[in-house]
Each structure stands twice: as structure tokens, then as C-alpha cells.
């Protein structure tokens, strides 16, 4: 059944699944999403009532694992500033400004913080453990406080790991206050913890994926002639909001779909256009990242053939993934599908201009990557996107993207991939 303009598939977002309802696509029927007395997506309701946040016990276990990894890698302590790693270990969210808000996790002893003195009360409201806060006044050095923490934790020589997103001026200030220490990457610790998701993390990511699929169903039903990518993003954001989260879906129309991350061109949707959509949401910080590609109206033979080829590449990724498989082999499996068809391979076009997938968790893009040269073996708990995009420069692109995770028994999808070009959802 083709996704036709005048009798478009509308998918209900209820638990009953996908219900087919005729939707007229004239401008008179266009649903208001803001500034109207009509309530947008009144058929949707929040899906977050059963969300279980990460427990303090699990976070404390993460800190203990970090300490073990530090000892294994000869690192005496690691430094983190506000961001997803700080949230991962402590549950604390903070903003990044010119004022340091920092965290030291030592290989032995309790964690400790450094924050502006006038922010101490606010900081203590957020702390769930680790109550040693070293404050500094506006005319004092925050870097000296970090040096004092390290000294007090017995770090008088050896290596201090810097989390990968620490800004240079913070690293540089700490280095100047404690020049006798060696500063190294904290990746063996932070990546060594975060790349392996626990059952609680998997459950949160499953919820994020479930919600985004329902937002897709509701949003695709409202595609209509003349719509722009900005119109669709606003609709998809409203759908996510109605489902109880902040999220959105970008849309690239017609030739703009050939750019992996879209175009700034103003393009209005017309019959026969490819629509490539990519988006997600977060639950307790854990992300979804899903793409769907459809045709507005009746797909032509070339669109259908190439859509099916992209699906074959996506299937090759999933079929190859598993415990012990090097990440680069998964990427190679997708590219081989395109080579076998007669495309040049590598990153040449027509073909796939980017890696077959990336890690996902608290960051939409994180370790480890499905790309040539990455020999990291897949292990249980690792989570990835599966998106070996197919691009025809200046014409169109197709990306089918679903997230999956590795179990002892092999890969498992968070979402069911699209069955066909005119059926975006199973």
C-alpha cells in the first residue's frame, strides 16, 4: 500500500498499534500545533509513567568500577567537568560556564567537588553522595582547589586522567597548579564504564525508542503537500511533547535527502518526493536515534529498488553483529552489499558516505563506532545505531536507522526495522 497524498496512512500512537485512517491532506485540514485552541495530538498521552531512573546504588557501583579501571591502567585519579560523564557517575546535572564546577574521582578514597562559593548551596541540593566540596571565591583560583583535593587523596605523583570533554582552559589551569603530575586521557576509565549498558540503562533506551516510534507514526500521518522541514520538525516536537518527553525529528525532502545531515535549502514537499527523517528523544538522559525514509505519494521503480538495497545493507549489519565480532567487520558487511550491486565501495558515491553506525547512550553519538579500522570486539551491553545510508549525489538519499544492543545470544533491536518503502512501521 503506497503512502499516497490524499489517503495517507495515519498510525495511532496508542497501545493497540497501527490503525489505518484516511487523512485528507488539504490545507483546510492541516492541524494546528501552536497558537490554537485545538489541542495538538489529543489522541496521544505520556508514556513515561513507568520509567525507573538509575538508582544511587548503581551509580556508586559505577564509581567503584572506575576506581578498579584506574588501578588497572595506572591512573591515580580522573577529573570531570559538567556533562554526561559527570551525570553518569553521580546523577548531577550542571551547566558549563567560565566558572569551574569540577569532580575528582580518585582511585582510592571518596570523590570530591570544586565549585564557586556562591553556588555551594545549590550544589549541595543536587549531591546524592560525595559531600566534600571545595569552594573558591571569585578572586581565588579554582585550579588550586583541585590540586588540594589531589594532594589530600594521596595523589602526589603519577597520572591524572582528563575526561575527553574537559575544556582546555580547565586542564591547563590544573596542570599549572600541579605541574609535577602527568596528565593523560581518562578514556580507559570513562569509556570502559560507559560503553557497557546495564539492564536499567537498556530499559531507559527501550522507552526512548518506543516513544520516538510513536512520535514518528503520529507525525508522518500529518505530512502534506507544501510542507517544509521546519513544519515537520515542529509537528514531531509537539508529538514527542504529547508523549511526555522533549524530542524531535528532522526531515530532509527530495534532493536535500542526499546530504547526510540535510540542507539549508527551502524545499516544499510535493508528490513523489523522498522524505528522509531522523530524530529521537531522551529518557533520564538516555537517547534514541531512529531514521525512516518514505516517498510522499507513489514511489517509482528506482526509489523502490534503492530503498530495498539500503534495507539489505542494514540487514547485513545486523546479521554480522555479535559477541566477539570486530566493529569494523560490521561496517564492511554493509559496504559489501553496495559493492556487490556494482557501486564503487569505500566512501565513494553512489554508496555510503559515512560509517555504518555509532555507539549510543547518554550521548546520541558515543563509543564505539562501526567503522573501518575499529577492531574493538563487540561485547554484551554495547549499544549501536544501524544506518548504512545510501546516497545518490544531487538526487536523493535513503537512511534506514534502528538502534540495537549486544546480548550473549547476539544483537537485539530496540525497534523493528521498516518492512518496505511504503510500510515505515511493522
Image (cartoon, rainbow, N blue to C red):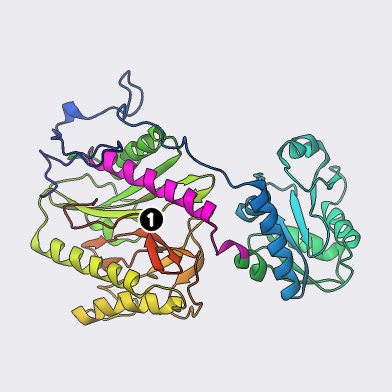
**Image point (38%, 32%), residue name:** 242
- Is 20 left, or right, of 385 in this rendering? left
Q: Quadrant of residue 150?
A: bottom right
Residue 210 visible in the shown view: yes
At which x and y percent is residue 299?
12, 55
Q: Quadrant of residue 189?
A: bottom right
The residue where tag 1 is placed is 414
Residue 169 visible in the shown view: no
- Is 404 left, or right, of 152 in this rendering? left
**Image point (18%, 56%), residue name:** 421
- Viewer-closest of 424 and 17: 17
- Viewer-closest of 129 and 231: 129
Under tag 1, what secondary structure?
Answer: loop
- Viewer-closest of 367 and 60: 60
At which x and y percent is residue 260?
34, 61
Q: Residues within 10 Å of mark 1 (few under 14, many from 20)?
A: many
**Magenta region includes residue 52:** no
**Image point (32%, 21%), residue name:** 36
**Image point (35%, 48%), residue name:** 250
**Magenta region includes residue 209:** yes
What segment is highlighted magenta in the picture?
193-221
Amino acid at each position: 500500500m503506497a503512502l499516497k497524498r490524499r489517503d495517507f496512512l495515519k498510525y495511532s500512537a496508542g497501545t493497540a498499534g497501527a490503525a489505518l485512517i484516511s487523512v485528507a491532506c488539504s490545507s483546510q485540514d492541516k492541524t494546528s500545533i501552536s497558537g490554537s485552541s485545538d489541542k495538538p495530538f489529543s489522541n496521544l498521552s505520556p508514556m513515561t509513567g513507568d520509567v525507573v531512573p538509575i538508582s544511587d546504588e548503581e551509580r556508586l557501583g559505577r564509581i567503584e568500577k572506575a576506581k578498579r579501571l584506574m588501578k588497572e591502567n595506572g591512573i591515580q585519579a580522573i577529573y570531570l567537568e559538567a556533562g554526561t560523564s559527570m551525570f553518569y557517575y553521580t546523577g548531577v546535572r550542571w551547566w558549563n560556564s567560565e566558572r569551574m564546577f569540577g569532580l575528582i574521582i580518585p582511585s582510592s578514597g571518596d570523590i570530591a567537588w570544586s565549585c564557586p562559593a556562591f553556588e555551594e548551596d545549590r550544589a549541595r541540593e543536587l549531591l546524592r553522595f560525595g559531600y566534600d566540596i571545595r569552594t573558591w571565591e571569585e578572586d581565588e583560583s579554582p585550579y588550586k582547589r583541585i590540586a588540594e583535593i589531589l594532594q589530600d587523596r594521596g595523589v602526589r605523583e603519577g597520572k591524572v586522567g582528563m575526561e575527553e570533554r574537559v575544556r582546555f582552559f580547565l586542564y591547563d589551569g590544573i596542570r599549572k597548579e600541579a605541574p609535577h603530575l602527568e596528565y593523560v586521557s581518562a578514556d580507559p576509565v570513562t569509556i570502559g564504564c560507559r560503553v557497557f549498558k546495564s539492564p536499567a540503562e537498556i530499559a531507559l533506551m527501550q522507552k526512548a525508542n518506543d516513544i520516538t516510534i510513536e512520535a514518528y507514526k503520529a507525525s508522518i500521518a500529518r505530512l502534506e503537500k507544501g510542507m517544509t522541514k521546519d513544519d515537520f520538525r515542529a509537528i514531531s516536537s509537539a508529538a514527542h511533547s504529547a508523549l511526555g518527553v522533549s524530542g524531535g525529528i528532522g526531515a530532509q525532502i527530495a534532493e536535500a535527502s542526499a546530504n547526510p545531515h540535510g540542507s539549508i535549502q527551502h524545499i516544499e514537499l510535493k508528490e513523489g518526493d523522498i522524505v528522509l527523517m531522523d530524530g529521537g528523544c531522551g529518557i533520564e538522559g538516555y537517547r534514541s536515534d531512529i531514521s525512516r525514509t518514505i516517498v510522499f505519494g507513489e514511489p517509482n521503480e528506482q526509489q523502490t529498488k534503492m530503498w530495498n538495497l539500503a534495507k539489505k545493507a542494514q540487514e547485513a549489519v545486523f546479521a554480522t553483529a555479535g559477541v566477539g565480532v570486530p566493529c569494523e567487520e560490521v561496517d564492511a558487511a554493509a559496504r559489501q552489499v553496495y559493492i556487490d550491486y556494482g557501486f564503487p565501495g569505500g566512501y565513494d558515491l553512489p554508496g555510503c558516505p559515512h560509517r555504518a553506525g555509532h555507539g549510543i547512550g547518554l550521548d546520541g553519538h558515543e563509543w564505539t563506532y562501526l567503522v573501518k579500522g575499529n577492531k574493538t570486539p563487540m561485547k554484551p551491553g554495547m549499544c549501536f545505531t544501524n544506518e548504512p545510508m545510501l546516497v545518490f549525489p544531487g538526487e536523493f538519499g535513503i537512511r534506514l536507522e534502528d538502534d540495537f544492543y549486544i546480548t550473549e545470544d547476539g544483537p537485539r533491536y530496540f525497534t523493528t526495522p521498516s518492512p518496505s518503502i511504503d510500510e515505515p512501521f511493522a
